[in-house]
Image (cartoon, helix red, strand yellow):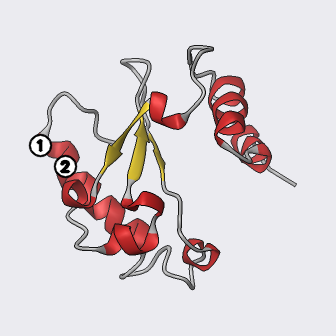
């Protein structure tokens, strides 16, 4: 059983519509416009070049891209990044999610320097 509202909401997320409504709007109280139907409507992508991932994203992530949901408040202390893996085994710790060569670790390494270069973007 889920221990907090975010964890519980994640259990209900099955597609973009439930992600937007159940997690963002209902749980996180994200002020999303009712007309928003797709994540791409409220997010921007980070490419392999942006993240300096050298072929990692193309082979392991859908469309070789990481999405970042745009912040809707200026005082927002956190960010939401979406990664859709090509295979379920890539989402596990054994499959390379974490660790020195993990997909998530490499994506985060690519994001940190990129965030520091643009003073308009928050650093999380």
Residue count near mark 1 (Cα–Cα under 10 Å), binned few <14, some 14–19, many ≥20: few
Outermost residue, bottom direction?
94
Residue for point 60% across, 76% down: 92
Outermost residue, right direction?
1
- Marks 1 and 2, how far apart at CA: 5 Å
Evaluate if marks 1 and 2 touch, with contact meaning CB atoms under 8 Å apart. yes
Question: Is 89 left or right of 55, judged from the image as shown?
Answer: right
The image quarter in which residue 56 lies: bottom left
Q: Name the quarter where the N terminus is drawn.
A: bottom right
Outermost residue, front direction?
63
- The disc placed on residue 104 is none
- The disc placed on residue 114 is 2
Q: Position of residue 73 (x, y in %)?
A: 42, 18
Residue for point 73% across, 32% down: 22
> Tag 2, which secondary structure?
helix
Residue for point 73% across, 45% down: 13
- Taking 114 as reference, is 100 above or below it? below
The image quarter in which residue 70 lies: top left
Question: Is 31 left or right of 81, judged from the image as shown?
Answer: right
Q: Name the quarter where the C terminus is drawn.
A: top left
Q: Position of residue 25 (x, y in %)?
A: 65, 24
Q: Position of residue 45 (x, y in %)?
A: 35, 44
Q: Position of residue 5 (x, y in %)?
A: 75, 38
Q: Mark 1 = which residue?
A: 117
> Tag 1, which secondary structure?
helix
Residue for point 36% across, 82% down: 100
- Taking 123 as reference, is 29 above or below it? above
């Amino acid at each position: 059983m889920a221990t907090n509202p975010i964890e519980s909401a994640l259990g209900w997320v099955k597609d973009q519509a439930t992600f937007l409504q159940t997690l963002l709007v209902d749980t996180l109280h994200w002020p999303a416009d009712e007309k928003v139907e797709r994540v791409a409507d409220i997010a921007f992508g980070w490419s392999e070049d942006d993240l300096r991932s050298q072929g990692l994203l193309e082979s392991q992530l859908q469309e070789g891209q990481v999405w970042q949901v745009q912040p809707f408040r200026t005082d927002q202390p956190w960010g939401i990044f979406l990664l859709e893996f090509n295979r379920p085994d890539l989402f596990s710790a054994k499959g390379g999610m974490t660790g020195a060569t993990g997909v998530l670790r490499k994506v985060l390494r690519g994001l940190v320097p990129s965030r520091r270069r643009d003073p308009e973007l928050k650093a999380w």
